[in-house]
Image (tube, rainbow, N blue to C red):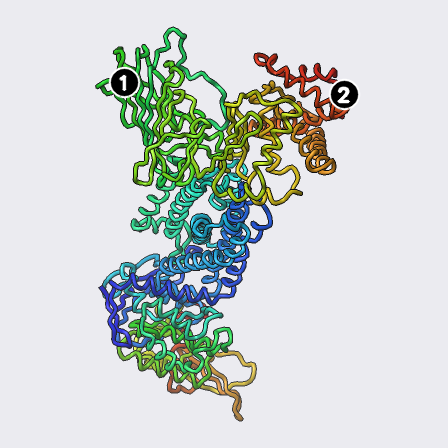
């Protein structure tokens, strides 16, 4: 060991080298803080969120939190990350360009010096993140007013911005260290950015190292899920970038030799090589074993064939089922226990379908353990497990399971339906309990106990639950009896208002956050107006006084709205102040809210339409929405925001190269073909068809005549109960032909 | 401290042979002047001594241990001033020295003030480097080399850009420092070596031509330095290298070094510069490059 005597008389020994890194870090930090370039980058980073406030392109979220938090933070994250990369490469190159490296490398390890510089840059990035958050806090707080949560706002900067800036710095530093050339480092960095853009094109969460994907933020419920997955992807990329950065340390040029010599010599540094490899392996493993999205097919495969179907005679009977489900919102976990009273076990192997995120911890039949095998082949939202029961009658099959509910890969594009967050729980049947094939369950055979945080209001199968036990530990266990298989559970910070329109009771369910908005915007009256208008023009919904309709606000985690018998759900932004406060916004979310309610008449409930290429219940619903809006806001408004929009979309569709030359479509990659089909289908249903109905209206003699026809169709709905109402049926009612409604 | 350079050969990846079978031993205290023409291999030797290059053959020992296994120790004991170097322009003199002090793990701020005083830069310590003159930058370079009281100081042309008064001052500073450490001074200015070095190395064509006391180098040049009067444009006598030409009233007084002085030349007392030039001349003659 060496020793050194300072002029101050102090003796330093080799053991004090860790202190040297801190000293280097300190002076590098100060040096960087004196650099004009650093200050320029800092100022640019402070303004980096600005495009996010002006342009809505950085996140998929359209809620207030999405617009004023996710979008600006992601804009700042992406722009800032690129700026930090430029600064990092410039600073790394500067040491060599300025000639200081000749002095520095002689007295200090180039690795220590480079490490200190990187640490200093990471520190400055952290400080700039904090300052950026502070700078934009007042504006954001004012814009989203009472929805603003400082904790959530800061979490975005800490989870999205800071790690991404760090990742960018580490990558840029590593690239320069490996190449030792600015232009090459920049080119390779651009290549990494392209990887991210690939993730943006294909809506992939995990390849997006530069711009974490935020599917949506909820204003009224919970945004933990998108933050969780963003945090997880940040951990993956921090591991990968840090590992890569450590590998680049092995490439530090020594003895004026090239990359290969330095790297081969650097491989001797096991203390660097080992953690580098561990980090890279950890990153790849975290990626592969991510618990959020299953590994199923990219597209929905609509099939009921589970490969285990059998003739009806061999279907065995389950007498009763009991599900006991406990949620752990802090970690997003579910613990479940399913008990099946089986009259006669199925002879042969039974398929059990359950969320791929769950693991069966125990399976018993009577007193015996049951062997089972899970196949690591995910389907759309479920994973198969096979087991065979002994031929013993009237025993109870108990399945215990636990895990993190996944969302299917096919739906990850636009929704995160299954999640357990502290303020919002949404679970589809595959995420609630196992589904057994080959077993018939009588109606109302399942008793369900679900334990959730006490402050949440649950809805099971679209109906409020009423029975609960307060467990005294801030949780409540809610109980209900329902069908064994089709189940849907939602719990949120809900308000349930009951609105009566004539003989119909409507359970109007919305987030507590929106209570004042509902009050101020007179939403209850709007509901009454829609039901009154449609009732007068088309006929009343076929419910008796005792029947109810659930109108539910969905979390923005789930895109769009939809209608089911007795249920109409609309997306969260319908009630956002942004939407309801701006009547000039046109065909806005408010009108989507009306649209979803009109679905109670056309499609889903009143009249089921065929789902042809050009025809579905959407056309009638969009047309009726237009008519109601026209009556409410006037002709000009309806023309501008409905008819003009339809015409533009249809014209665009007609002018599309691939629609004019369909012979080229098969030459396109499957993904583009699917996108084209989706686009055409949307335009046909939401634009072309209402335009054709509008044309039919002109041909039959005007609005009143069309109202009469629609009233008649609705009155005859029972005629179509078995055979869906088709386009030809519509033409027949109107006395028109296909050629009559052909659009030029 | 002790440095042993044993049979070092250095061939660059480009194929250029910079040093051939060089062996040197240096022990503190010692002030070694390294003389040699451009491209002789002086800078390569210095880079090898600071572990900036790996020798193609041979080994360097630091306190009897391989230099590469002693890199941390070497760096902690090293003061190095290369021939050309850069400074961070946006920093003040003091900040830059503080930066270098951190690199050298020198924690005492007094050490910075000490080298500032030694290099007469105390008044400029708050001046940004971008505002310094060439000589002042050179002094900052020297200051950083002296920082932390290093035991091995390697200086490559340290007095370039300094005025004569400063040159003398630094010579003296180096001389004082050499009391308890090793200083290697590479320079073209033979006068500097003569003034302060107790040992001189002459390197030429990658080989050490002489390693010994300056007086020994001078002694072996006795009878090989002479003067004669010449006419303008007259060629140098065969086998002679003209060291200087002084115009006098009688004609041009030429000073030459040669293995065999011409008969008409008058032998004179050699200086160290004569001795160095004779050394190089003799080597060139032997290799047929004269």
Residue on which the image places disc 1: A396
Label 2 neighbourhood size at 10 Å, few (<14), some (14-19), many (20+)? some
Q: Which residue is mark 2?
A: A700
The span from disc 1 to disc 2 (Cα, nearest Å) is 64 Å
For the residue labelled by badge 1, is the local secondary structure a helix, a strand or a loop?
A: strand
Q: Which one is in front, B200 or A623?
A: A623
Q: Give left or right: position of B115 versus A298.
A: left
* Residues marked 1 and 2 touching at CB (< 8 Å): no
User: Residue B71: x percent and y percent?
Assistant: 30, 61
Q: Residue at x 32, y 50 (%)?
A: A272
Residue A470 percent coordinates (x, y) = 32, 36
Query: Could you tell me which chain the residue with mark 2 belongs to?
Result: A
Quadrant location of the N terminus of chain A in the rendered image: bottom left
Q: Nearer the viewer, residue A65 or B224?
A: A65
Residue A288 in the image: above or below residue A729: below
Q: Secondary structure at mark 2?
A: helix
Q: From where the camera sits, is residue B96 visible?
A: yes
Q: Nearer the viewer, residue A63 or B274?
A: A63
């Amino acid at each position: 060991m060496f020793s050194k005597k300072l002029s101050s008389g102090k003796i330093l020994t080799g053991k004090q080298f860790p202190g040297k890194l801190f000293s280097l870090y300190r002076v590098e930090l100060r040096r960087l803080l004196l650099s004009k370039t650093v200050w320029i980058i800092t100022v640019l980073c402070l303004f980096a969120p600005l495009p996010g406030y002006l342009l809505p392109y950085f996140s998929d979220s359209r809620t207030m939190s999405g617009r004023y938090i996710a979008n600006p933070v992601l804009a700042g994250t992406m722009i800032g990350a690129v700026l930090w990369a430029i600064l990092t490469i410039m600073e790394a190159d500067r040491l060599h360009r300025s000639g200081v490296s000749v002095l520095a490398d002689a007295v200090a390890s180039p690795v220590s010096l480079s490490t200190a510089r990187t640490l200093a840059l990471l520190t400055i990035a952290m400080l700039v993140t904090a300052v950026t958050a502070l700078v934009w806090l007042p504006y954001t707080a004012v814009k989203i007013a009472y929805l603003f949560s400082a904790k959530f706002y800061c979490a975005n900067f800490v989870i999205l911005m800071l790690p991404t800036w760090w990742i960018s710095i580490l990558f840029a530093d590593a690239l320069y260290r490996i190449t030792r050339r600015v232009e090459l480092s920049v080119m390779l960095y651009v290549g990494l950015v392209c990887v991210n853009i690939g993730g943006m094109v294909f809506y992939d969460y995990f390849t997006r190292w530069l711009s974490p994907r935020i599917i949506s933020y909820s204003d009224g419920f919970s945004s933990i899920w998108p933050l969780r997955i963003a945090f997880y992807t940040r951990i993956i990329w921090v591991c990968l970038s840090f590992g890569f950065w450590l590998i680049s340390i092995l490439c530090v040029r020594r003895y004026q030799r090239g990359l290969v010599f330095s790297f081969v010599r650097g491989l001797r540094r096991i203390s660097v090589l080992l953690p580098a490899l561990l980090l890279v392996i950890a990153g790849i493993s975290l990626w592969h074993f991510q618990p959020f999205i299953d590994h199923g097919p990219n597209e929905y495969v609509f099939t009921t064939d589970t490969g285990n179907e059998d003739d009806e005679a061999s279907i065995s009977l389950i007498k009763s089922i009991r599900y006991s489900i406990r949620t752990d919102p802090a970690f997003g976990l579910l613990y479940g226990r399913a008990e099946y009273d089986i009259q006669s076990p199925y002879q042969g192997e039974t398929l059990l379908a359950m969320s791929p995120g769950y693991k069966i911890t125990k399976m018993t039949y009577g007193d015996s353990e049951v062997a089972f095998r899970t196949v690591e082949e995910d389907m759309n939202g479920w994973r198969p497990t096979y087991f065979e029961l002994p031929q013993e009658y009237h025993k109870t099959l108990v399945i215990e399971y636990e895990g993190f509910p996944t969302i299917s890969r096919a739906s990850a594009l636009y929704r995160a339906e299954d999640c357990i967050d502290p303020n919002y729980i949404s679970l589809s049947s595959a995420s609630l309990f196992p589904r057994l094939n080959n077993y018939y369950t009588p109606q109302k055979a399942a008793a369900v106990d679900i334990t959730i945080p006490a402050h949440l209001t649950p809805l099971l199968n679209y109906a409020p639950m009423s029975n609960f036990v307060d467990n005294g530990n801030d949780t409540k266990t809610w109980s209900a009896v329902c069908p064994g298989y089709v189940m849907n559970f939602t719990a949120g910070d809900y308000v349930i208002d009951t609105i009566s329109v004539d003989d119909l009771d409507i359970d109007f369910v919305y987030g507590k956050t929106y209570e004042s908005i509902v009050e101020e915007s007179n939403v209850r009256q709007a509901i009454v107006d829609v039901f009154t208008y449609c009732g007068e023009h088309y006929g009343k919904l076929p419910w008796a006084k005792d029947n109810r309709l659930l109108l539910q606000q969905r979390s923005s985690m789930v895109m769009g709205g939809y209608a089911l018998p007795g249920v109409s759900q609309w997306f969260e932004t319908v009630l956002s102040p942004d939407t309801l406060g701006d009547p000039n916004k046109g065909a806005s979310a408010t009108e989507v809210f009306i649209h979803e309610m009109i679905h109670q008449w056309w499609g889903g409930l009143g009249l089921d339409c065929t789902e042809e290429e050009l025809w579905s219940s959407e056309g009638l619903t969009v047309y009726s929405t237009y008519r109601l809006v026209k009556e409410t806001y006037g002709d000009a408004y309806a023309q501008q925001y409905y008819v003009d929009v339809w015409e533009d979309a249809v014209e665009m569709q007609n002018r599309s190269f691939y629609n004019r030359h369909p012979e080229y479509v098969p030459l396109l990659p499957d993904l583009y073909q699917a996108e084209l089909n989706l686009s055409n289908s949307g335009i046909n249903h939401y634009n072309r068809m209402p335009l054709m109905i509008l044309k039919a209206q002109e041909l039959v003699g005007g609005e009143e005549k069309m109202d009469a026809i629609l009233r008649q169709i609705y009155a005859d709905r029972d005629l179509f109960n078995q055979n869906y109402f088709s386009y030809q049926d519509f033409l027949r009612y109107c006395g028109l032909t296909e050629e009559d409604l052909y659009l030029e | 401290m002790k440095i042993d350079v044993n049979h070092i050969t250095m061939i660059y990846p480009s194929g250029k042979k910079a040093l051939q079978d060089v062996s040197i031993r240096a022990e503190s205290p010692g002030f070694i002047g390294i003389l040699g023409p451009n491209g002789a291999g002086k800078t390569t030797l210095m880079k090898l001594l600071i572990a900036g290059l790996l020798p193609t053959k041979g080994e360097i020992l630091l306190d009897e241990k391989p230099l590469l296994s002693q890199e941390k120790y070497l760096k902690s004991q090293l003061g190095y001033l290369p021939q050309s170097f850069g400074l961070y322009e946006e920093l003040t003199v003091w900040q830059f020295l503080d930066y270098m002090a951190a690199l050298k793990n020198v924690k005492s701020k007094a050490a910075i003030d000490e080298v500032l005083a030694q290099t007469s830069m105390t008044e400029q310590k708050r001046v940004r480097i971008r505002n310094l003159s060439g000589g002042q930058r050179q002094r900052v370079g020297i200051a950083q080399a002296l920082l932390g009281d290093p035991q091995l100081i390697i200086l490559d042309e340290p007095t370039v850009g300094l005025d004569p008064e400063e040159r003398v001052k630094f010579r003296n500073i180096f001389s004082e420092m050499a009391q308890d450490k090793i200083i290697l001074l590479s320079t073209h200015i033979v006068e500097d070596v003569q003034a302060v070095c107790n040992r001189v190395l002459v390197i030429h064509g990658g080989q050490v031509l002489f390693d010994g006391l300056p007086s020994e180098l001078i002694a072996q040049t006795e009878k090989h330095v002479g003067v004669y009067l010449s006419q303008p444009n007259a060629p140098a006598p065969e086998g002679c290298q003209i060291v200087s030409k002084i115009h006098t009233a009688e004609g041009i007084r030429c000073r030459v070094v040669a293995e065999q002085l011409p008969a008409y030349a008058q032998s004179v007392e050699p200086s160290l510069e004569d001795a160095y030039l004779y050394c190089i001349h003799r080597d060139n003659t032997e290799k047929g490059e004269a």
